[in-house]
Amino acid sequence: MPDSGQDSGSMGPDTRNSGRDSVNLTNFLIADLEQFGQALLRNEEIGERRFNFFLVLVTAVVGGLVTLHTAEIQFRGDTLQYIRSGAFAALFSFGFLTYLRMLQRNRVTDEFKETLRFIRRHLLNINGADMQYEVPRRLVPRNRNWVRGGLAETVGVMTAVLLGLFLFFTFHSLSWAIVVASVVAIVLVGFAIPREGESPMKALRKAFQKVKLHASPTGVPAQYFRAGAGAVIVNRDGDRVLALERDDFPGAWQLPQGGLEAGEEPLQAAYREVFEETGIRKEDLQYLDKGREPLVYELPACDRKPKTGRGQVQYWFLFKFRNRDDAVNLEEVQKGGEFRQYEWKPFHSLVNSVVRFREPVYRRLAEWFEDYLSESGAEYLNNEESSGST
């Protein structure tokens, strides 16, 4: 009884310290949320002021040129033509610089929004994964399109028109001015539409796929669970598994996984995802076992997207790693991808390091593959390898 009392007494300070740490972290995240929110608003206001200045400048210069053209003023030779060409050339140059600054403003805005979503995910994980909270999409628009273009797209079109006017007044060819201005407008708008890291054509293809696959008659993304595959890769000793730390959520680890592509079988998808996320090739893996049934996890409301749906239904496979650690190369295959580092972890340690909505899946995997992942796992792995070679 005295020992029991001593244990319960020793647990009290740890529990209180843990509670204080949680409160302090929550306050810190709330302060960061407010700071980055204000920075986002300032960045948006700067972009709007820059756009308004460019619009006023173009209006003033064009108005001045119209006044010169209609006024009864005699100019020597081609002086008026030179004035018009020079004015439109200067406006085009200034417009192109403004366009580049607007692209930078969009990039910074996207970074601030991703940071705010990252902080909100941390707050939701601290306060429980069952919380249902999502910022209304009308308040935080994430995608720009051709019809409802943003300021960068508008500046791009205006810049292209100014280039067309410069070409027309300089070379007196209306057809070439229209063709060049149209091409430049398409290019500038195309580069303003996609998110960072996407080509214009890729962004357009994704937009059409999103409309065709995920839009319902009411305009709300369809409710579905995406089919996926995952891989548990054990080392030679059978006591550790390959874990990946997420780049967007430091401290959160997971196993290689991903969605199935069209016409792809789950096992093929598992091999592909392992290579795309870790650089490990199929020949470096020995197939050992598969999960008894597909496992499901549901994403928190704030992380749901048309691509992911409500979560994933996953087929799981167990492999043994048969190569050296230098065969694992995140940087070469991902090039700024979703993971920052890898580590060989005991499976029970990995379960305690995943985000909460994945915990039930990983605990079930630990039950299914416990013979391979226990302290005597090497014996099972050696038996499997021996039987496979005979």
Image: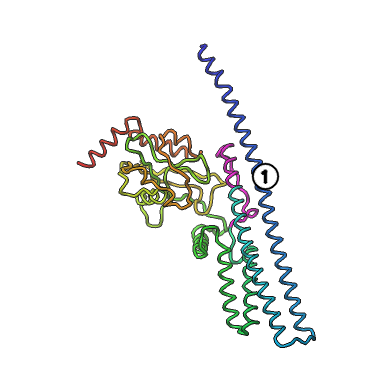
Please state the horizontal and vertical placement of residue 86, each as a whole percent of the image.
68, 77
Does 173 appear in magenta? no
Dot 1: few (<14), some (14–19), or many (≥20) neighbours within 10 Å? few
Please state the horizontal and vertical placement of residue 162, each as a whole percent of the image.
65, 74
Please state the horizontal and vertical placement of residue 213, each as a whole percent of the image.
49, 59
Front-most of residues 99 and 186: 99
Image-quadrant location for residue 8? top right
Q: Amino acid at mark 1?
A: Glu
Q: Which residue is mark 1?
A: 34
Q: Answer with left or right where residue 265 lies relative to residue 90.
A: left
Front-most of residues 352 and 245: 245
Please state the horizontal and vertical placement of residue 74, each as a whole percent of the image.
77, 87
Front-most of residues 11 and 299: 11
Q: Answer with left or right where residue 77 lies relative to residue 220.
A: right
Above or below 146: residue 326: above
Image-quadrant location for residue 194? bottom right
Name the residue furthest top: 2
The residue under the point 63% across, 85% down is 172
Image quadrant containing the C terminus: top left
Q: How many marks?
A: 1
Q: Answer with left or right where residue 248 lies relative to residue 162.
A: left
The residue under the point 50% across, 46% down is 247
The residue under the point 51% across, 51% down is 223
Q: Could you tell me which secondary element the residue under label 1 belongs to? A: helix
Question: What range is drawn magenta here?
Answer: 116-142
Q: Answer with left or right where residue 317 lies relative to residue 221.
A: left
Q: Visible in this render: residue 148?
A: no
